[in-house]
Amino acid sequence: MTKISLRIEVVRSSFKHISSMSAESAGDIVTLLRQHYSDVILTNVDTLKDLNALVERKPDLVFAGIYFVFDEANNGAKVWLADVLEQHGIAYTGSGKHANRLSLNKHLAKTRMLEQGIRTAAFKLFRREDTETVHEGVLNFPLFVKPSNKSGGQGIDEFSIVYTTEQLQNKVAYIHREHHTDALVEEYLSGREFSIAVIGGPENSFVAMPLELIAIEDRNGDRIRSQVVKSSNSEDMNHIPNLIERSMLEKFAVDVFRALGGAGYGRIDIRFNALGVPYFLEANHIPSLIQIDSSFLRAYEMTIGKDYESMILRIVALALKRDYALLSHERISPIL
């Protein structure tokens, strides 16, 4: 097979706290892309120096597995990968800085939903530096408490659903103390939960691919997608046979993705209330693409009917197509 002449760097970090792509997933992507493109390497970008070196090499495409690095010389300010690549005319997969910032800060994403008239549970952010006492009357119990900017179920456990002021105070304090971040408190949605993979289609359209996620019951009888559940891959991922329900979820997810400014691909998490009405939970613009137990891949296979190779090549093609100012028509792979 004749390979397309392109230099692609799959970028992740060796620092777990900034990498959104595992070493295993990155290795799989590199192996696959090497079958189709002439020059594919894996690059760890841990520091601003590493990011500057990446820009100096000027690859044709960056397959992004991080959102940002820290500028230690500037009080640890975030330097966003997408922002830097755009400034230097380098194509990249996924969304831009604005959308990524929203997806990483759950309260900002929820605020954006309210601005756009999209349903999300009532919420309040309790910042670490706030002196305000956590008390009743702000929201209606039961409440759900989680870190405002963590992924992978971090900080979520059997104590995340709270029914009293004391439980609320304890959980908020735990997140402040143990996870060193603000606590997002929202009114609990008791219905079913869904993960909707979203990927670009022709003429700036999007294809939404919903799955129902069913976590095992914890000792309280709740089905919560905690860090333990997510890391153990113990939740069921089910196709949605009801076409009306499926269509509703697809439209809702695409509306959310567009409202966040998403591009290329991403994942939208939705939960029903007790009446079966969908509400936005959170978004992930660099979802896991690992070949084993990835909800994104499972959704893609069930909806598109194609495999891992098709999915990765489609993500690459979308990124190359978007960067039309730099890449000639001949160098753009078709959407698969």
Image (spheres, rainbow, N blue to C red):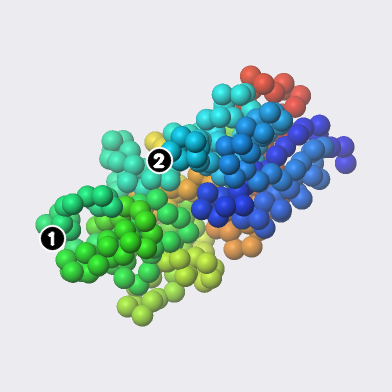
Q: Amino acid at mark 1?
A: Glu
Q: Quadrant of residue 94?
A: top right
Total of numbered circles in the picture? 2
Give the CA separation, mark 2 to mark 1: 28 Å
Please report the residue visible at 76 percent of the width from the left and 50 percent of the height from the top: 31
User: In which quadrant is the C terminus drawn?
Assistant: top right
Q: Would you name the residue on which mark 2 appears?
A: 102
Dot 2 or dot 1: first in sequence order is 2
- Judging depth in this view, the residue of 24 and 262 nearest the camera is 24
Q: Amino acid at mark 2?
A: Leu
- Judging depth in this view, the residue of 288 and 270 nearest the camera is 288
Please report the residue visible at 52 percent of the width from the left and 49 percent of the height from the top: 18
- Marks 2 and 1 in Cβ contact (< 8 Å): no
Check disc 2: other Cα within 10 Å, few if <14, some if 14-19, many if 20+: many
- Judging depth in this view, the residue of 258 and 95 nearest the camera is 95
Check disc 1: other Cα within 10 Å, few if <14, some if 14-19, many if 20+: few
